[in-house]
Amino acid sequence: MSGAQEATVLLTNVRPWGGAASDILIEGGVIAAVEPHDPARPAPAPAPADGETIDGRGLLALPGLVNAHAHLDKSWWGREWVPYGGEATTQGRIAHERAHRDELGIPSPDSTLQLLRALVAQGTTAFRSHVDVDLGVGLRGIAVVREAVAALGVPVALEIVAFPQDGVLRRPGVLELLDRAAAEGADHIGGLDPALIDRDPVGQLDALFEIADRRGVGLDIHLHEGGELGAFEYDLILERTRALGLAGRVNVAHGFAIGDLPPARQRALVEELREAGVSITTVAPINASRLPLADLRAAGVPVGLGTDGIRDLWGPYGDGDLLRLATRLAQLSGARRDEELTDVVRLATSDAAGFVGRPVHDLVAGAPADVVLVDAQNVPEALVLAPERELVLAAGVRVV
Ligand SMILES: [Zn+2]
């Protein structure tokens, strides 16, 4: 990893979104211009101005990948293999994690840094990370993740969700921790299965919305609960979002219940999400009800893609490659046509800007210079092959 955010970088002969060969001029970490490729274009001044020219060799250029649902604090990435243990239920995973994380030194800046290095090398340049906040770790996990991102030395975008993984109302003191996290700069507060974990969906959601409204932060709620129970919780979330005027600031993570509903109710819920300004994030699970992805996208409901936890006490899976995960989402969604495949890449890049607090995240002037180059004919092929990342720039800084 090298370079400096202040430098002028000329990235020549790349094909943004598979289009015509172009030159991308980057100044101060931001895309200053995208122009037709001109082999005679003068290179930016070298030292002492520190300008750099990078030959893009005609490769396909995409915006940096956006991981809209990560758990950067939980992983044992880079350490000796940790075998899976404990029960496979949500409560079983919570208990197993709380019983064993201390002996593994989780959360630790070192593990988070090693994980981040791997993710960034695969082209992810912006993250929304849930970070556990509970009576055991307090707010230490948030400090750990911020420390690791600072140590990374690469200007990635990071939004923090203070996440009450161990429950809210059932653990007196957690609401106060969430309130403090929000006061101290967390971008969002989280929630978790308000019925099955806290056995009080109205109570948990009322308490979370009260903090979000008062502190002016977003809400990002893990909702694994399916069927009618999950549908009821969607209703509670929509009702509170409307009542408090929090359109654009509330996200449902997973939200499997929408996939369980019969078609007419599913369509009605999609419309309500659009109207209330509630987004959804998915981790493209292979063993859960399918999101109505095409309907959500057609309605304009923001849908983000994330890795969820990667190699942690919840499970051994995950390589962190968000482009490969986008391939899986496309397959699960039945995407086959070029425009459908391209749409999934947009979902995982430019269309995810809002999940990381950016007004624009694309290969256009004024956007942060987050660029990924791959060897592919076009965007559909890039999605299907998820080829090696030939170059990754984060805010103009070369990562790979
Ligand atoms: Zn999660």
Image (cartoon, rainbow, N blue to C red):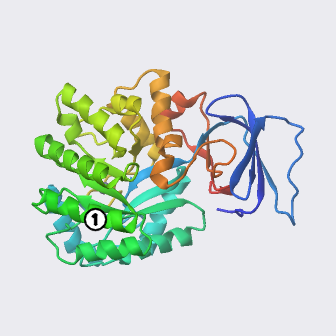
Residue 311 appears in view: yes
- For the residue marked with disc 1, what is the amino acid? Glu
Residue 313 appears in view: no
Residue 230 vertical position relative to residue 213 in the rendered view, above or below: above
In the rendered structure, the answer to whether residue 150 lies left or right of residue 182 reads right
Give percent across and percent down for residue 122.
52, 50
Q: Quadrant of residue 170?
A: bottom left
Q: Residue at x 34, y 63 (%)?
A: 213
Quadrant for the N terminus in the image = bottom right
Quadrant for the C terminus in the image = bottom right
Residue 173 vertical position relative to residue 230 in the rendered view, above or below: below
Give percent across and percent down for residue 266.
23, 31
Give percent across and percent down for residue 283.
34, 46
Ligand 1 occupies quarter? bottom left
Q: Residue at x 34, y 26 (%)?
A: 334
Residue 82 vertical position relative to residue 246 in the rendered view, above or below: below
Q: Residue at x 15, y 62 (%)?
A: 203
Identify the residue under disc 1: 210
Q: Residues within 10 Å of mark 1 (few under 14, many from 20)?
A: some
Q: Quadrant of residue 333?
A: top left
In the rendered structure, the answer to whether residue 53 lies left or right of residue 159 reads right
Residue 100 vertical position relative to residue 349 in the rendered view, above or below: below
Task: Compare residues 176 and 55 and report the one nearer the observer.
Answer: 176
In the rendered structure, the answer to whether residue 206 lies left or right of residue 199 reads right
Q: Residue at x 46, y 61 (%)?
A: 159
Task: Compare residues 66 and 82 and report the one nearer the observer.
Answer: 66
**Regarding mark 1 in the picture, which secondary structure is present there?**
helix
Give percent across and percent down for residue 28.
73, 59
